[in-house]
Amino acid sequence: MRAMVISGGGSKGAFAGGVAQYLMQGLDHNYDLFLGTSTGSLLISHLALQKIEKIKEVYTSVNQDSIFSNCPFVIQKKHGVESIGIDHWNVLKNFYRGGKTFGESKNLLKLIKNTLTEEEFHILKNGPKDIVVTVSNLSMNQVEYKSINDFDYEEFCEWIWISCNYTPFMSLVKKNGCEYADGGLGSMVPIEEAIKRGATEIDAIILQTETTMFNRMPSKNAFALLTSMFAFMLDRIEHQNIRIGKFVANHHDAVINFYYTPAVLTTNSLIFNKEKMTAWWQSGYNFAKYKNLETSQLELDVE
């Protein structure tokens, strides 16, 4: 069984889309299982449907308004560098309304439903492929994996949305008596789960460089500090997921093909920039193509 696993990474999901496009169209890889976390969960349904151009259009045109119904920060640009600052009015407004987070991302749920139709959902559910998204159950202190086979259209769209909710900046969702948030808080790269579900060969797209390639600038405000802290924690979780994934793969004779970003794409994946995301998609496609051509050449040289 072949699986595609896509990690979390916010706006960097555009790079993953490009990699996936080459693997599926350039190499004709056919996947039985698609497993995603956060931004990865937004991609996988459309990849399974072979609707690559459709999801590419979404990823290369999305902006802050597409995601946030109440955006908690403003984007500041100084000397060509983008950073975020607190939108005090929006944050106070959210707290006044009884919100538990700085902002709300209800527009993202609308975007998911507008992009993945009910008809497409039923095509996937009645098909041979399994589509699985990762969520974090904060109440039960555990990671959960939600398969398309277990839910109706409305519920599955909601699970995709929940998988992407990067709290405390985005919505905290109460469902089935529990509080749920971004799947990346527990499992950024769900390789182990793919193997548990029977995968013997996995193409894992990691929206991070293989080694640390930058030092973060000093935090300028509370939001910058929070995003740096969360980025640090998610980076540690990601490295742990990969180590565990490799260990489990060795014990199950599974093969993992890793696709890391070759360079740092952004230090803040909450900023959605059309031009940059368009470039990242093409960069992902070119990188996957180059990596596989390089691998093929090495194999020929060995022979």
Image (cartoon, rainbow, N blue to C red):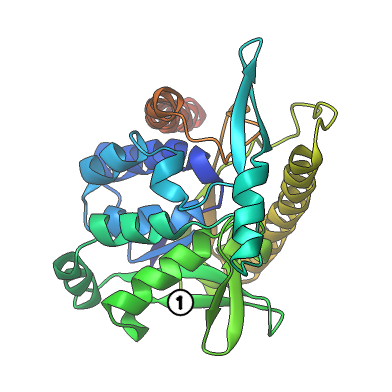
Q: Which residue corresponds to mark 1?
A: 146
Q: Tell whether 229 sits left or right of 12.
A: right
The residue at the far top in this view is 79
Q: Exactly how many numbered labels are in the figure?
A: 1
Q: Tell whether 153 sits left or right of 258.
A: left
- Along the viewing direction, whichever of 8 and 18 lies nearer the viewer: 8
Q: Is residue 188 visible?
A: no
Indicate the quadrant where residue 265 lies.
top right
Where is 172 relative to 112, above or below? below
What kind of residue is marked 1?
A: Lys
- Provide residue 123's location: percent of width, then percent of height: 16, 70
Mark 1 packing: few (<14 Cα in 10 Å), some, or many (20+)?
some
The residue at the far bottom in this view is 177
Residue at 40%, 71% in the rendered image: 158
Residue at 55%, 70% in the rendered image: 135
Residue at 51%, 76% in the rendered image: 145
- Along the viewing direction, whichever of 62 and 281 lies nearer the viewer: 62
Where is 282 relative to 167, above or below? above
Helix, strand or loop status at disc 1: strand
Q: Tell whether 57 sits left or right of 84.
A: left
Where is 111 relative to 297, above or below? below
Image quarter where the N terminus lies is bottom left
Residue at 80%, 47% in the rendered image: 229
- Provide residue 271's location: percent of width, then percent of height: 54, 35
- Provide residue 257's location: percent of width, then percent of height: 51, 48
Where is 256 relative to 79, above or below? below
- Provide residue 36's location: percent of width, then percent of height: 47, 60
Q: Is residue 196 visible?
A: yes
